[in-house]
Each structure stands twice: as C-alpha cells, then as structure tokens.
Amino acid sequence: MTLNILRDERSSILGDKNKILVANRGEIPIRIFRTAHELSMKTVAIYSNEDRLSMHRLKADEAYLIGENSENKYTPVGAYLAIDEIIKIAKKHGVDFIHPGYGFLSENSEFADKVTKAGITWIGPPAEVIDSVGDKVSARLLAAKADVPVVPGTPGPIETVEQAQKFVDEYGYPVIIKAAFGGGGRGMRVVREGDDIADAFQRATSEAKTAFGNGTCFVERFLNKPKHIEVQLLADAYGNVIHLFERDCSVQRRHQKVVEVAPAKTLPLEVRNAILTDAVKLAKTAGYRNAGTAEFLVDDLNRHYFIEINPRIQVEHTITEEITGIDIVAAQIQIAAGASLEQLGLLQDKITTRGFAIQCRITTEDPAKNFQPDTGRLEVYRSAGGNGVRLDGGNAYAGAVISPHYDSMLVKCSCSGSTYEIVRRKMLRSLIEFRIRGVKTNIPFLLTLLTHPVFKDGSYWTTFIDDTPALFEMHSSKNRAQKLLHYLADLAVNGSSIKGQVGLPKLHTQPIIPQLHDSNGEVIDVNSVAPPAGWRNVLLNKGAEGFAKAVRDFKGTLLMDTTWRDAHQSLLATRVRTYDLAAIAPTTAHALSGAFALECWGGATFDVAMRFLHEDPWERLRILRKLVPNIPFQMLLRGANGVAYSSLPDNAIDHFVKQAKDNGVDIFRVFDALNDIEQLKVGVTAVKKAGGVVEATVCYSGDMLQPGKKYNLDYYLDTVNKIVKMGTHILGIKDMAGTMKPAAAKLLIGSIRAQHPDLPIHVHTHDSAGTGVASMAAAALAGADVVDVATNSMSGLTSQPSISALLASLDGEIDTNVSISEVREIDYYWAQMRLLYSCFEADIKGPDPEVYLHEIPGGQLTNLLFQAQQLGLGEQWIETKKAYREANYLLGDIIKVTPTSKVVGDLAQFMVTNKLTPDDVRRLASSLDFPDSVMDFFEGMIGQPFGGFPEPLRTDVLKNKRRKLTVRPGLELPPFDLERIGEDLKSRFGDSISECDIASYNMYPKVYEDFQKMKEKYGDLSILPTRNFLSPPVVGEEIVVTIEQGKTLIIKPQAIGELNKDTGIREVYFELNGELRKVSVVDKNQKVETVSKPKADAHDPLQVGAPMAGVIVEVKVHKGSLLKKGQPVAVLSAMKMEMVISSPSDGLVKEVLVKDGENVDASDLLVLLEENDEEEK
C-alpha cells in the first residue's frame, strides 16, 4: 500500500499545489508530514550531514542534503539556517509550500520574505507581521497600540550591559534578559540582586546568536511566581481571528517548558476570558495571519501581562488539538493556500474544549546532574501507548544516535481524558511504560514532578522547579537488564576478568539442590517449612552470657561449619559467590540446625566480595541471615584492624562492628595477628558495645611440643589468662597453619580446661598436614566445647578437617548434635560446587607435613602458591617455602596470621625474586627497598611482637625511612569523621549510601570505590548464575536471571559481530525476553590505533570533565590558576545552549587539556587539578 491512495483524493482547497517542504528537523517535520499526507500532499525533507540517518528524512517522500553541491560547508545548526540554500532546494524540486516548524528559521522574517518572493507559499504569517510581533520589543509596541498590559521593560533592544544596568537602576531587581528573536528558553537569564549582570548579558546574547542567528536582547522586570498562560490563535487572510483556548505552560526549567496543560486548571473564568479577548485583539491589531500563540504572565493577584506573540506553531500545540479536536497543522496549510476559517468550519462559537490534556517533553537529560544533556546511542527504546496517549517523536528508536548538536527532546508524550486527575494518572502510567536505555532521560524527574502536591492541585508557577528542591529526590530506573547485557557482552568478547581464574568451570549443568527427609521419609520443603530451632534461638532468648553458659553446659562437642568462609578461602581463593551460598542456605538451615555456628563472613571474604566478585558483602550477610534464622553466624574480626590489613581508628572499628551485628553477625571471633592484647582489646570492646558474642582468640603458631620453641605451653596459658582477665564469652584457639598435633591439642586444651573449667573453648585448625581430624578429636576429648570442620567436598588440604570424618572419629564417645545423614546430603551440593569453581583450584595434591617446618597458614599456602606462579616463581616453589621459614626467623619468629603472615610471605617472595640469603638481608638492610608490608611491620603499625623486634635489623630497615612505634598504632590515629565520610560518599555515589557503605569505605577505600564503579557499569552481578558469571555466553543458550521476586529475564545470545578495525569495537547481539538487543564492546584482544582524549574520573574531585559532548566556547583558566570550588573553568556549547563548567573542588590547575573551539565528548578530561600545598601550609 502507498500514499498514492490518499493522493487520489486530492483536496479541493489545495488544488494542484500539493508539494510541501519542512525546513526543520526531528519531531516537527514528521508531525507536519503526517498531516500533509492526509491532505494528499507530497512531502520533502531537508537534512544536515549530521542528520543523514535521522528519522524525519525517512518519513518524507523526498529528502535532500543541505549544501550537497555547495562550496559552503555548513555547521550542524547552520545548515538549518541556510536560507538561500533551502530555497534553492525547494525551487529545484518543485516545492509549492514551505513550513518552517518551530525554532531555527520559523520566526525569521527574511526567510519568510525570500520564500514568498521565490514564488513559494509560506506557511505562517507574512514577513511584515513577523517583524511587528516576532521580536519581543516590537511586540511591546503592538501591545501598547492594542491597549493590552505588559510587564515593565526596556522600550527597545539594548546593545550594552550599561543599558541593562540603567533599567535595573530604575526598576530594581529581579530582571530577566531575553533574546528578542526566538524562544524555547534560549538566550534567557534571570538576574537577581548580587548576581553578575555583565556575565548574564554576555551569556544571553551569545546563546541567542548561536540558537537564532541574532543576539539582540531586551530587559524586563521579572515577576515573582507568575503563571505562564498562552493562547492558541488561528487567523485567515480575510481578517478573521479565532482562539483555540489557552494552555498553562508554567512548569518550566531554564525558561524552557517541561510540562504543559490545556486548558489551565486553576485560572479564574474572568481572567481566562480577559486573556482570550486580549489575545484575539492583539492578533487583529497586528493583521495576523495563520497560526500563532499569544503569551501572557499572570501574577499572584491574577493580573495578566502580555509577553509576546510567537508567529509559529508551538511544541505544545498537540494538547490543544487533543482538547479541541482541531488539526492545527492542517489549518495552517489550508489557510496558507487561501482558505478562510469559515471554509474550514472554524468558527469561534463552534469551538469548545473537552476534558484536559497534558504534554510531557521527554528529553535526553540527566536531572541528577542539573539536567545535563546526554548523548549516545539508544540501546533500548520501548514507548508507551493505549487509550488517550499520543506520541510525537523524532529519532526515538533503538539504535538511534542522540547528537550533541541539537535540542535534547526525544519524544513528546501527550495524554488526554475527561478530568485533570485522570489525565495526570494516565501520564504517570505512560511514563512508567517507557523503557529507554543507552542515554539518560528526564523521566525520573517527570514522575517526581507529576506526583508532587503542587502539580496535583495545578498551582505551579514558572519557577516552581527551581524553587522546589524536593523534585530532585527521584527514583531512577535501575536499568538492570541492559547493564547485565553489557557484562555478558564483555565476557563474550574478552573472556572473564576475574583475577585468579584459570580456565572455565567444569560443571556445565544447573547445580542440583539435595533433598532432606523427615522421620517418616517425606521430603521436607525447606523453602516453606521453618527450620528447627537452633543455637541462635538460645542466643536470642538468653543473651550472650546465657548463650556461652549453654554452650559450656552442652554434654558433648559442638561443630562450626566453615564451608561458607574459611573452607572456600583456603581451597578456592575465597571466590564462592552469594548466589551459590543462598541456593543451599535453606537446606543448610535444616541439615545443620544443631550446629554451633556457620562461619560465613569477615576476614578475606569481605574485601574479595567487592574486589573480585563485584558484590556487596553486606547484602550477602543480609540475604543469608534471612534464609538461615536459626543457626548463629560467626565472623572473623582482625582486632584493631577490623577486616582491613592495618590498624584503623577505634571509632571505625566500633562503627564497623555495630553494622555487622545489626545486619546479622552473632559471634565475633576476634584475634590479633601478634596476640597483642592491647590490639585485641579494641575489637573485643567494639563487640561488647554492639551486643555481640565475644570469642577472643589466641593465635597458635608452630609446634609447641618442640623443645625450646618460643611459643610454648606457658606462653599460651599466660595469653589465655590475659584474655580471661580482659573478659570474653568464649575462648578461641586459632591454628592457622594446621601445626597443632593431636598431642599438642590434648595438652593445650586440657591445660586450659583445668585452669578455666567454666570457660567455653572453641578450636580452629587447618588440615594442611593431614592430621586435622585427629587433632580436633583430641581437642574434643580434652574438653573443647566447639571445633571447626568443613563439609567433606570442601575439607582437607589447606581447609578444615572433614565433618564426616570427625563425626566418625567421635562416634560413640562424644555427641555433636549433628545428623551425619543430613551432612552427607548437603555435601552432594558442595561436590558440584567444587566442579563449578574448579577454575580457582590451587594445584595442591595432598597433605604437606612440611607445614611443621615452614608454618605457612592454610589459606595463605593456597594464595602464596598462586602469587608465586603469577610472579614467575612457580618453578621455585620449594625455594619459596624455604624462604618463608627463613623470613619468619629474620622477623623474629612471629605469629603468622593475617596480616603478619602476609609480611612473612612478602619478604619470602622478595628474597627469592632478588636471590637474597638471610645474611644478605641483614647486611644490606639499610639499602634495600623492602615491600610496604615489611616496612609497616618493623615500624610497629601491625603491633608489638612477643619478645620484641629483631635488632639491629629493625633499625637498619627503618633507617631514614620510618619511625619506631612503641605504642598501639590506633592511639596515634585521629578518629574518622564518619558524618563527613558519609556526605562525601553521597556526593559521589548517590543518596542511597548507608552506614554499611561507610563501613566498607573505611576498611577499603579504593576497593569500595572500584566496586561502586563496577556496580554503576554492570549493576548487581550477584544475581547472575555463577557459570554465566565466569564463562562466556554460548550463542543460542538461554540464560535465566531472576532480578527480583516475580521478575525474570530470559537472555539468549545471538551473535558476535565482526571487528570494527577503526574503533576496535564488536557488536554483540542478544534476545532479551524475546526482544533483540545490541551491545557495543571494545575488543581488548585487538590492537587498534585510535586517537582519543583521556577521560575524567567522575569520582575524583581533582579531574574536571566535560559534562556532555559539545564545543568549548571559552577556557577560563590556565596552568597555575588557583581555583575555588564552584569557580568557572570553561564554557561549553551543546544542544543549542551554553553551560558553565565549574571546578568540583579547590585546587591549583596542573594542566589544561583543551582550547577554545575544540570539540569534546562527554567525560573528556578538560582540566587536571592538584592540591594547593601552599594554601594548606
């Protein structure tokens, strides 16, 4: 079917003149083409080079490039201002009518005159009428002639700032500087008392010249909280004028309309009638012809003032059409062709309104960044629809590129209905239906605006948006699906970026959750049946003291399962994800309901979650806590370090522990890497304040049975006595290296029990030497109340002893309160997990009895082997283990637990890499550049080791480099300003920042910042199935992702495109819930030479970036400039407006990377600052 069917029914009014050219771009040409086609006309589009892919070109019968064969090279905006070139195209192709649309040349009398003289019909008022009403100064003269009130203003255009100042001296502030030609908020500046009027005048004239080709401005008094009411007019060539009632256009930003309503909801009848009468009077006085709009301001006393007549169609004409049923564009064309209003059936007494209509301008602007226009490709575009919903769009489709050169409006959404409230709700529904991805839009702001009480009652005014900060408290779309596609696309092109991953998971199927059975053999529905009461119920009922007593009173030995933390830290580099823990959590709550606790949080799992798994450790804690309400959760707390690797201020530890307790941790295993009681006390005190269960812990190191060993029975008993004196609910014994032999366990635990019969004892070990089961059995028989184990498939080697093996060892002697059959059931799941995470397995084949010599902790043994391989020392692993022992003795034979174990490991690798013997280290100590961790140790930043530091090595290492600390490091650290940190994080990452975020940042500032950037880029990756998180997606294979309850994404990879050799980009295609999506990804495996500017880090206040793509009009600083926060750095012109780019912080300009007239893309680095040290002094 073609448009020829319509053309066979040619309009009698138009006759043979049926070819129309629209001298415009974007939405309005399409709108005009639609009516023209209904009138059986042929349509012609014109376009700039930058618009060659724009939709308006495709909607016309013919389309021509502006300046195609011309010697002139037009700018993107300049092309649509090229009067002679446009007329040349029209004449060449037999055009009968030219419609200017709105903006560009729509109010240019020269254009209208030249079109008419070229023998082409101009759709709009004649040139002389445009001159008499089109600029605001002439309009004021017209108002005086028609005896219509106007706002006090300059009698004519002004050319200098001195003229503007003279008006202010006479009428006072506030005033508004307005472009005399054009509208849409361009070239307007409000100046209040204390503002720089000279700067405002310069900006207004410059912006007006850019947008309209004429920088003429005038000044008038600025009314306080007025309404902006405009009247739609139609006039024929025979002196007849009618109005189509009014529109309320008061909801504006930067003098540009955002939402329009027809008719005005709160305008009194007598004021409405007066305005309508004056509008018609003005049009008749001017001898007006065609469509136009008379604009008025109404003050708080309901006095109305004429502003201007816009001699063109308005953006918001759609809502007038909706309430009157009149096609204004059709009337325009037919009036231009000679029709009278009567011929068109447009008589005033026949025109009525029905109901209300609201129009929202959906723009590609980011309201959270002061409506900064956004540019880029529309990855997703899904629009609204339904009864009473009208859409007028331009380049609004998936794949469209939003250019920085033009207005940011994407689509106009107009809704109509019988009442204002019905229409408001219809608009809300429509806005929610939109799905736009790839660029930011103002939809979140529009939703907030339409639900504000002021909008609900219709009492808004022209500065309502500026006066109402609450409007910027928005709920933005999460864009979850598209962000996930970006991650999957990058995975498809570049492979996994998870550090430590070697190869792909060996599990290729969905993990199976094992079933549990009740005493009758019936399957237990673990997701709906509450788990049996456990030890957490005891804790909640009796408190920490009562809980500890109940543990001690238990006739047997309880078990803590470390599978959820230390086991996978030791075997799988801490890489097990929340997704897989949550999957087995309900089953675990039933199967291990009698367990003492689940170790599931803290230690290395905290930073690894953010650093490598890109997930929030706090959210993991909350999810697991909800799924396992009956078993206590235990975390590992590094004393005065929290979960960091060095000391922090005491208030940071207190704050962190409180958040941990509030979010689900019950028992805190608190230790210090050097058994420094002063360091340990910081963590213990924090736990007591928070109301948690304190498990103050002695770190066990080496084989205490060896004669002459530094850490012998007397040492441990003395340390235990100090801990008991300090106060603890439970005593922890932490054997990190697995060097506690069964005989040592029997001796140590038996001795502690003899001295402290009422003290609950909890023992932890690693099975590195293969003696873990025997040692824990010995500890249990000697009086331990709790021992640590791991599920069978995650046990042994550097992990904890096997739970089933221990149960078998204790069978018939000691009750553990755990069912061995249910233990076997959940282990089936972890056997699958071992395959799923096989790509993180360490290459350890069996037990390592040498641990009694090198004393490397279990978790570190795995990591150290991996690090050695990364550093190219894999073949020297035997040397590394030997060096570890030597490094330990160089450091004074220290307790080796994180972070001291890292100190020993770093020194060992340093020695192997540099081929240093212990004697070399002692001899060259003052000249060697030791790793930072080693320097921190010798300085005393980790604490004071038992027996003191080795001398003279310490003095030589620190010589002229570091001080010697003799007190607890935290005593010299000033408290963190938690409130300031929170405010800073909110300013950088949004208002959703919580106390948990502050705690994360305090522990690991850089890791937390990187995690936030990753989350901003890819969203919440924890919801992806692990196989899809680690393995490139397979074409044609469905990926099912549940983003929240009742919302499931079905993703099917379709294809990976060819490499673009110019950009290094590949397009990756997916089906998302049956809809085709395309994602662009840089192929990091290809070397493509591209010239690009460095990008600013949005989270670094010393980097000033371009807020959007555009042209730098003026650089206002130079190298060495001293800047204050908020001081102008540069002026950017984009989307036909200018914006001042301000400095995000105080500083000294280190480098300026742009110059005047340079094109920039969004986020391009413009200016680099550095802190001003002189000022700080």
Image (cartoon, rainbow, N blue to C red):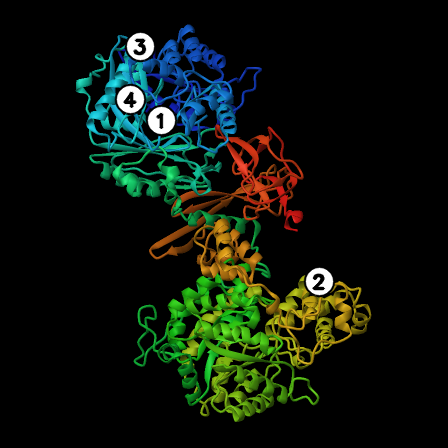
Write down the residue under mark 2: 872
Tell me which label, 2 or 3, sits earlier in the chain.
Answer: 3
Q: Secondary structure at mark 1?
A: loop
Query: Quick check: 973 above or below 763?
Result: above
- Would residue 612 be visible to someone looking at this image? no
Foreground tag (3 vs 1): 3
In this view, the mark in front (4 or 1): 4
Q: Give the labeled residue for mark 4.
A: 232
> Quadrant of residue 880 in the image?
bottom right
Q: Which mark is residue 489?
A: none
Q: Position of residue 708 (x, y in %)?
A: 71, 88
Left of 675 or right of it: where is 991? left
Q: Amino acid at mark 2?
A: Gly
Q: Residue at x 33, y 16 (%)?
A: 41
The residue carrying mark 3 is: 287
Of all residues, the one furthest to the front in this rendering is 170
Mark closest to the chain's N terminus, 4 or 1: 4
Front position among marks 2 and 3: 3
Determine the CA span between mark 2 and mark 4: 78 Å
Pick whichever of labels 2 and 4 is earlier in the sequence. 4
Label 4, label 3: how far apart the Cα atoms are = 16 Å
Q: Which residue occupies the extreme left position in the image?
A: 349
Residue beneath the point at 49% across and 28% down = 197
Callout 2: SS: loop
Q: Nearer the viewer, mark 2 or mark 4?
A: 4
**Can residue 615 be seen?**
yes
Q: Amino acid at mark 1?
A: Val
Q: Are there few (<14), some (14-19), or many (20+) residues within 10 Å of tag 1?
A: some
Q: Residues within 10 Å of mark 3 (few under 14, many from 20)?
A: many
Name the disc covering residue 315, or none: 1
Amino acid type at mark 3:
Gly
